[in-house]
Amino acid sequence: MNTQHTERADEPLQGHNPPLLYNLVYCSRASEGVDAAAVDQIIETSRRCNPPRNITGLLVLGSGIFFQWLEGPRDSVLALLALLKQDPRHHTVVVLTSGEEVRERLFPDWDMELVTADAVRDVLVDALDSAQDPKNAEALRALLQQLDAGLLNGPAPD
């Protein structure tokens, strides 16, 4: 019998607790020559490749700095990070936080969304306003604190 399963493999069934979900936040410096077309290609590739890996998240680019939140199964996220570290479109990859816990996804419908630095605060505040899981709310507050501390502010790449 061939049945279609439309839920993510790591998402809970109704009446079950959320699964262990690994999340990783990193920042990196965009390489010289990375333009809007290159960023569009990153998003297109992410939207094609992330769903089979059960990875969701968001990507922010501001002042020549990439900031990315990834969430999904631990092995999938770490394998993606290994690939990202080899990507010549950025360098100086710094993992800001990572962890694995039982909680719902912060960005369940975003295979990968590009958010401008100007809009990221609004996205995080909206997510915080709708967060029902206390762990999600705590993670979002931490991201807002990092943003407010100037994480995305910096000189443009040479």
Image: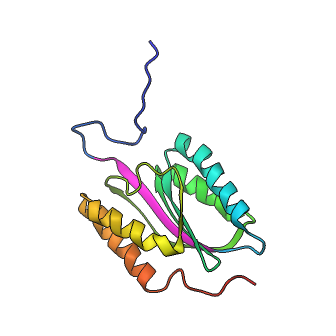
Quadrant of the rendering where the C terminus is positioned: bottom right
- How many callouts does the rendering have? 0
Question: What's the residue at 40%, 50% (across, down)?
Answer: 108
The colour style of the image is rainbow
Q: Determine whether 37 is above or below 61 in the image.
A: above
| Rendering coords of residue 109 (x, y %) | 43, 48
Q: Residue furthest top?
A: 1
Quadrant of the rendering where the N terminus is positioned: top left
Queried whether the magenta region covers residue 26, the answer comes back as yes
Question: What's the residue at 33%, 73% (across, down)?
Answer: 141
| Rendering coords of residue 35 (x, y %) | 72, 68
Q: Residue furthest left?
A: 15
Most common SS among magenta residues:
strand
Residue 103 sits in which quadrant? bottom left
Query: Is residue 38 found left or right of 123 in the rendered image?
Result: right
Front residue of this view, candidates 107 and 35: 35
| Rendering coords of residue 2 (x, y %) | 46, 16
The range drawn in magenta is 18-28
| Rendering coords of residue 29 (x, y %) | 66, 76
Q: Determine whether 155 is above or below 128 in the image.
A: below
Question: What's the residue at 36%, 75% (across, down)?
Answer: 142
Question: What's the residue at 46%, 56% (across, down)?
Answer: 71
Front residue of this view, candidates 74 and 35: 35
Queried whether the magenta region covers residue 91, the answer comes back as no
Residue 138 sits in which quadrant? bottom left
Front residue of this view, candidates 54 and 124: 124
